[in-house]
Amino acid sequence: MNRPLSQNSWHYRELNARTPGLDHFSNGLFRLLDAGHPVVAGSADLQFSNGLNRFAERHPERYIQFGISEQNMVSVAAGLATTGMMPFVATFASFLGLLACEQIRMDVAYCAQPVRLVGHHTGISMGFYGTSHHATEDIGTMRSIADLTIVSPADGPQFEAAIVASADHDRPIYFRTGRGREPALYDAQKPFVFGKAIEHAKGEEITVIACGMPVYPVVQAARRLNAAGRSVGVLDMATVKPIDRDAILEAAASSRMLMTVEEHNVLGGLGSAVAEVLADEGIGRKLIRHGIRDEYALIAPPTHLYAHYRLDEAGIEREILAAIGG
């Protein structure tokens, strides 16, 4: 029997809490529409979880509610793209990047349709919803699909800026976003550049390369360490594919070691992408990959999981100190 959620339960608070970061999804679409772009949007019964409810209320004629049919949603988006529309479709990353992988590969990427795929609540951000809802393999899956750009914004404003920048991008994009609770690090009005890393600091001892949710805690940890006399560099690798090879090689040349931090399996994700660049170029630089270490994540509130896997500020700071000695 299904019981109503207690107002004291974590599930109730999570589902009904205000998530201002989600507003940036619709804000980006509004900006594209105001500029004259033929935007349409759709979701698999999750418009209140991803913020598309605001878009649906303002432009109901441009919104499609697909229900729980993620694979069909992706195929329909590919069809809409063939008519000249600019489709954005969104659902949980675990369902989009994994369940709909075949449709993304064949209907979108293989056919070179400029569909914007938005996988939200990435990594372990679904917490208690468990393994079926955790998305710790989607970067690896999507990265192996040819001609598919992958963007993992650090916060809502960066996501909005990337949405606006996608107007000039004629290939399919997989946006990997959080749950709208990420602290703001960027300004939505700052132009986003696909394929270009954002440097927050240079470091001689180590350069930490991160994407998505971990970027903010990495920046905060590096600021504290640098203030204490250490030398820690930070790169936000928001575009995971195509990756900024020049930024990686420059960091390898100026730092004694590199570290990647991601809310993803350390196999197949950002860490693997950086390792491939170093191997391709024959760079003998130590690389530490920090994230989910090839396991299924535990089930708990996201804050507890971030602390357990050392993906919060304190945990990341400890990982950096363990690497550089201190």
Image (cartoon, rainbow, N blue to C red):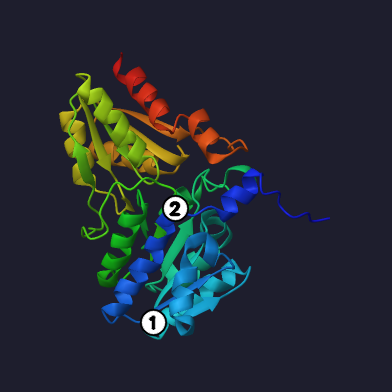
Q: Quadrant of residue 235?
A: top left
Seen in the picture, residue 304 relative to 148 is either above or below; the reply is above
Q: Tell me what residue is drawn at x 19 percent, y 29 percent.
A: 203
Which amino acid type is marked by label 2? Gly
* Residue 144 visible to the viewer: no
Nearer to us in this view, 239 or 199: 199
Q: Tell me what residue is drawn at x 44 percent, y 80 percent.
A: 59
Q: CA distance from mark 1 to mark 2?
A: 27 Å
Residue 71 as seen in the image, left or right of residue 273: right
Q: Tell me what residue is drawn at x 51 percent, y 55 percent.
A: 93
Label 2 crowd (10 A; few <14 / some 14-19 / many >=20): many
Nearer to us in this view, 19 or 140: 19
Which amino acid type is marked by label 1? Met
Residue 31 as seen in the image, left or right of residue 227: right
The residue labelled by disc 1 is 85
Q: Quadrant of residue 270?
A: top left
Among the two numbered marks 1 and 2 on one chain, the one whose residue lies closer to the N terminus: 1
